Image (cartoon, grey):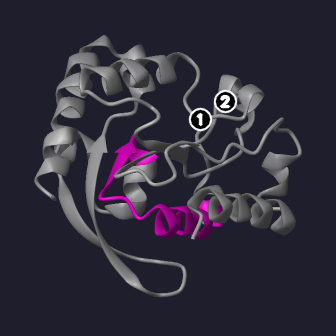
Amino acid sequence: MDTQTELDKIKQAILAADVTPELSVQALNLVMGDGNPNADIVFIGEAPGKNEDEQGLPFVGAAGKFLNEMLAAAGLDRSDVYITNIVKYRPPNNRDPLPEEKQAFWPYLARQLEIIDPKAIVTLGRHSMEFFLPDARISQIHGHAVRKKVKYHDGKEHEWLIVPLYHPAAALYNGGLRQTLIDDFLKVPEFIKGLK
């Protein structure tokens, strides 16, 4: 199976189904993902922002630059990992995605994960964390690895290592979180080594 071809089919399915038409009508691009389609680690944010919408790629603005710095500090590169969001269209004025918007995109994200089949999922911010760990509080669980069974769209269960982290944008607005996020981020390669 050619992973990228399968991922491209998800994009076509989203366009064909006209998922969240109220978002798609005001967005420039459907932002699917970026990086290695066979990655061991998938990073999941919440939704594209202005820069992401313009370029059609996730995490290319200020938060993306910080993400790239943290990847480099952890000995990783964007080409080593896969980066996506739950919601694939930019919400107006960068507002938080609504629960029904996240729900509408969840089957497509689950399919992305099924195809990539990573060893670990790193959630960036509470919006993506809530899908995997609905009862968790990010302030308590950030930087910890949790094994979690998740059902795929076809009903099959798959166990993943979920690592919740604060969203890089949060560290840009709250300088006190910056070092916390870096420290948590540097643990990720160690968690992956523990899986091999």
Residue 52 — which label?
A: 2
Local secondary structure at mark 1:
loop
Q: In the picture provided, is 87 more to the left or to the right than 90?
A: left
Please name the residue shown 39% across and 40% down the image. 124
Q: In the depicted view, which residue is nearer to us: 122 or 193?
A: 193
**In whole angstroms, how far apart are the C-alphas of marks 1 and 2?**
5 Å
Which amino acid type is shown beneath numbered disc 1? Pro
The percent coordinates of residue 196 (x first, y second) are 15, 58
Queried whether the magenta region covers residue 87, the answer comes back as: no
Residue shown at the point (54%, 79%) measured from the top left: 153
At 82% across and 38% down in the image, what residue appears? 27
Q: Main secondary structure of the magenta part?
A: helix
Q: Is residue 100 visible?
A: no
Q: Is residue 191 above or below residue 182?
A: below
Q: Residue at x 41, y 25 (%)?
A: 67
The magenta-colored residue range is: 104-127
Q: Amino acid at mark 2?
A: Glu
Q: Earlier in the sequence, mark 1 or mark 2?
A: 2
